[in-house]
Image (tube, grey):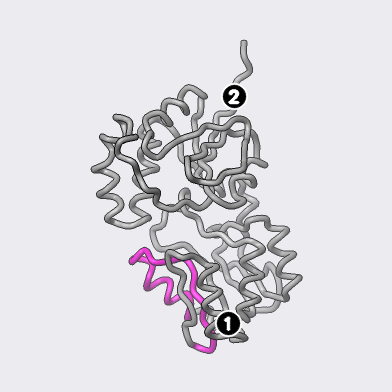
Amino acid sequence: MAPRGPERAIVAGRGVLPDLLLEAGPAYVVAFAGVPVAAQGAGRIDARFERLGQLFADLAAAGVRDVCFAGAMTRPPLDPAAMDEVTKALVPRLMQAMSRGDDALLRDVAALFEERGLAVLGAREVRGDLVARPGRLAGAPLPEADVARARAVLDALGPLDVGQGAVAARGQVLGIETLQGTDAMLRFVAETAPDSGGVLVKRPKAGQDLRLDMPAIGPETVRAAARAGLRGIEISAGEVLLLGPDEVLAACAETGLSLWAAP
């Protein structure tokens, strides 16, 4: 009898998260055309967004029972001529979800996998050590007024599906994360308000499905915040991934930035 393969597949996007999840145990790697993926895992399943029917068949043939989405992806251009029959039938449903924003689209994509008997796991379910417990992770306490200001902005914008991060200093909002991401926001802050001594707050949007789009910071986020003249970062305990906890804390020690996890 042939050895049984892993029952998990990592639907891989850009960044280091797919490799971090593979450290938890063997898994297949689903790599979509046009998405640069270096991770190989126990086996590679090549896929196209236009051929979801083929992907579901390949996952079933491999004996996959659960999937975990990991890494950044952008909405791809689709070639209608390349669509299989399953994808063609799903187009109206996916277009309707797209019109409601990224969160709605991601929830509908997860539902497609669940309807085919696959469990959808979040990254923190695969590697619980990538999220922090409440409290100080590095450095001195952060200015409460600036933290509260950034939190309030994110609470107000969450229902609009805008972003997961905001920067505040001395009562002013210096930057809000949008589609361009945290790094672009921090570059803007560095250019427009250098040496502000502000705070970056990173947390999920209200009602966000954390299995599919969990906020994350890595060591480069810490270094970018330091270049922007910030004094620290607050994340939500248990709800923001640390893309290499040891590396993130080393970057805090290197830059002198504070890092706190709020309950």
Location of residue 48 (image quadrant): top left
The residue to which callout 1 is attached is 198
Q: Is residue 137 left or right of residue 170?
A: right
The vertical placement of 253 against 23, above or below, is below
What amino acid does circle 2 point to? Answer: Gly
Q: Earlier in the sequence, mark 2 or mark 1?
A: 2
The vertical placement of 109 against 194, above or below, is above
Q: How far from the left and from the top, in percent, is residue 70? A: 53, 47
Indicate yes or no whether the magenta region holds residue 162. Answer: yes
- Which segment did they paint magenta? 149-171
Q: Secondary structure at mark 2?
A: loop
Alpha carbon distance from label 2 to label 1: 49 Å
Instruction: Say which quadrant the N terminus sits in.
Output: top right
Dot 1: within a 10 Å radius of its alpha carbon, few (fewer than 14), some, or many (20 or more) residues?
many
Q: How far from the left and from the top, in percent, is residue 44? A: 57, 32
Indicate yes or no whether the magenta region holds residue 122. Answer: no
The vertical placement of 97 against 252, above or below, is above
Q: Nearer the viewer, residue 79 or 35?
A: 79
Dot 2: within a 10 Å radius of its alpha carbon, few (fewer than 14), some, or many (20 or more) residues?
some
Which numbered circle lies on residue 62?
none
Q: How far from the left and from the top, in percent, is residue 145? A: 53, 84
Q: Residue at x 67, y 74 (%)?
A: 258
Q: How far from the left and from the top, in percent, is residue 32? A: 48, 40
**How many numbered circles are shown?**
2
Instruction: Say which quadrant the C terminus sits in.
Output: bottom right
The residue to which callout 2 is attached is 5
Q: Residue at x 71, y 64 (%)?
A: 249
What amino acid does circle 1 point to? Answer: Gly
Q: Is residue 214 left or right of residue 114?
A: right
